[in-house]
Image: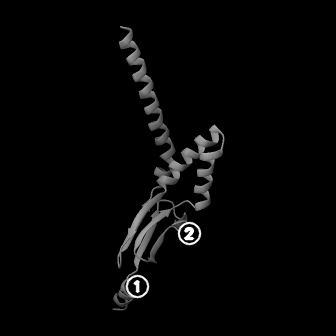
């Protein structure tokens, strides 16, 4: 009986708040809600007003540094920043918090860490495809 009362107060006792749960396959990762730290994984029943939010494993400073390197640094650092932004993107999720509901998010660190590889593979495939198409066109024109 006490458990039911406790659950009711927790879920319905704070007005129209929603609740956020954030887990990762690597516990102890810092979690940021719209750039502000809210703790480390796992986070359970974090009360939050309904609305849309950005949940990330990366702080605002890391994101901003990658952005400025992308804009102002030399070519090597720009490429490095671009690959870092793919990792940040994989470690960030946009969520909608609904009243009196629990929203669950799960981060897979292996997917986050592999994001730059897949971005490089996609980029290389696009460049290689364009280059190959150019060669094929040249061969067809030469015939």
Give the side of residue 18 with respect to residue 82, left or right. left
Give above or below for 43 relative to 24. below
Question: Dot 2: within a 10 Å radius of its alpha carbon, few (fewer than 14), some, or many (20 or more) residues?
Answer: few
Report how far apart the C-alphas of labels 1 and 2 lie in the structure: 23 Å
Give the side of residue 18 with respect to residue 39, left or right. left
Figure disc tally: 2
Report the residue marked by disc 1: 10
Question: Dot 1: within a 10 Å radius of its alpha carbon, few (fewer than 14), some, or many (20 or more) residues?
Answer: some
Which quadrant, please, contains the N terminus? bottom left
Kindly indicate the quadrant of the structure image that contains residue 104: bottom left
Which secondary structure, mark 1? helix
Which secondary structure, mark 2? strand
Which residue is the extreme one toward the top? 143
Report the residue marked by disc 2: 36
Which quadrant, please, contains the C terminus? top left
Spot occupied by residue 105 in the image (x, y as percentages of width and height): 41, 64
State which mark lies toward you, 1 or 2.
2
Kindly indicate the quadrant of the structure image that contains residue 94: bottom left
Residue at 53% x, 66% y is: 32
Spot occupied by residue 44 in the image (x, y as percentages of width and height): 45, 74
Give above or below for 107 relative to 9. above
The colour scheme is: one colour
């Amino acid at each position: 009986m006490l458990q039911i009362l406790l659950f009711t107060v927790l879920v319905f006792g704070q007005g129209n708040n929603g609740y956020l749960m954030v887990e990762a396959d690597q516990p102890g990762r810092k979690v940021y809600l719209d750039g502000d730290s809210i703790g480390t994984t796992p986070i359970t029943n974090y009360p939050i007003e309904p609305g849309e939010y950005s949940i990330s494993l990366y702080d605002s400073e890391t994101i901003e540094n990658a952005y400025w390197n992308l804009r102002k640094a030399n070519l090597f650092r720009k490429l490095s920043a671009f690959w870092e932004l793919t990792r940040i993107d994989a470690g960030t999720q946009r969520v909608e918090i609904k009243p009196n509901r629990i929203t669950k998010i799960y981060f897979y660190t292996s997917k986050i860490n592999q994001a730059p590889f897949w971005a490089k593979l996609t980029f290389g495939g696009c460049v290689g495809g364009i280059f190959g198409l150019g060669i094929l066109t040249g061969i067809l024109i030469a015939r």
